[in-house]
Amino acid sequence: MTIKTNAPLPIKVETGLKYSWCSCGFSQAMPLCDNSHRELSHKKSFKFIAEETGTIHLCGCSETQSPPYCDNSNNCRRS
Ligand code: FES
């Protein structure tokens, strides 16, 4: 079962550290990858390096065309 949500999800990141955004929607750690895709999907995670320390919002629906960020592809709820 996927854990997708139709809204961007916040995570705290640190400058220079590498993160993996979940592109399959099966991760139990959304919006970050927990390697569930290895058994449940053909999709791979999207890796990125944080440019600054702070809270960023990543796509929670896995349908963005601008990974890992929400691009409103899914008429997303935004707060
Ligand atoms: S949450 Fe996925 S495109 Fe907005």
Image (cartoon, grey):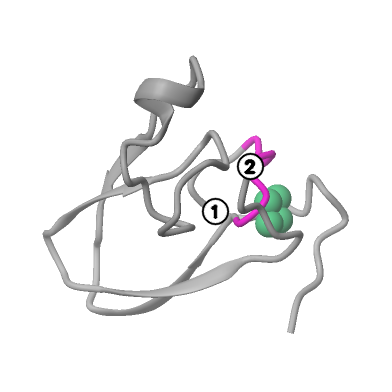
Image point 76% across, 59% down: which residue?
6
Image point 81% across, 70% down: which residue?
77
| Residue 26 shown in magenta | no
- Near mark 2 (Cα within 10 A), the count class, few <14, some 14-19 or many ≥20, is few
Residue placed furthest toward the top: 42
The label on residue 31 is none
Range of residues picked out in magenta: 60-65
Front position among marks 1 and 2: 2
Majority secondary structure in the magenta region: loop
Image point 41% across, 59% down: which residue?
29
Whether residues under marks 1 and 2 lie with C-beta atoms below 8 angstroms apart, the answer is: no
Q: Position of residue 24 (x, y in %)?
A: 54, 34
* SS state under label 2: loop
The label on residue 1 is 2
The answer to whether 60 is drawn above or below residue 67 in the figure is below
Q: Position of residue 43 (x, y in %)?
A: 48, 21
The answer to whether 21 is drawn above or below residue 42 in the figure is below
Alpha carbon separation for disc pair 1 and 2: 22 Å
Image point 57% across, 42% down: which residue?
25
- Which amino acid, mark 2? Met
- Near mark 1 (Cα within 10 A), the count class, few <14, some 14-19 or many ≥20, is some
Q: Is residue 38 left or right of residue 19?
A: right
- Which amino acid, mark 1? Tyr
> Image quadrant of residue 14?
bottom left
Q: Position of residue 62 (x, y in %)?
A: 62, 42
* SS state under label 1: loop
User: Is the residue indicated by label 2 positioned so its CB lies within 8 Å of ligand 1?
Assistant: no
Which residue is denoted by mark 1 in the rendering? 69
Instruction: Identify the image quadrant of the C terminus.
Output: bottom right
Quick one: label 1 or label 2, which is nearer the N terminus? 2
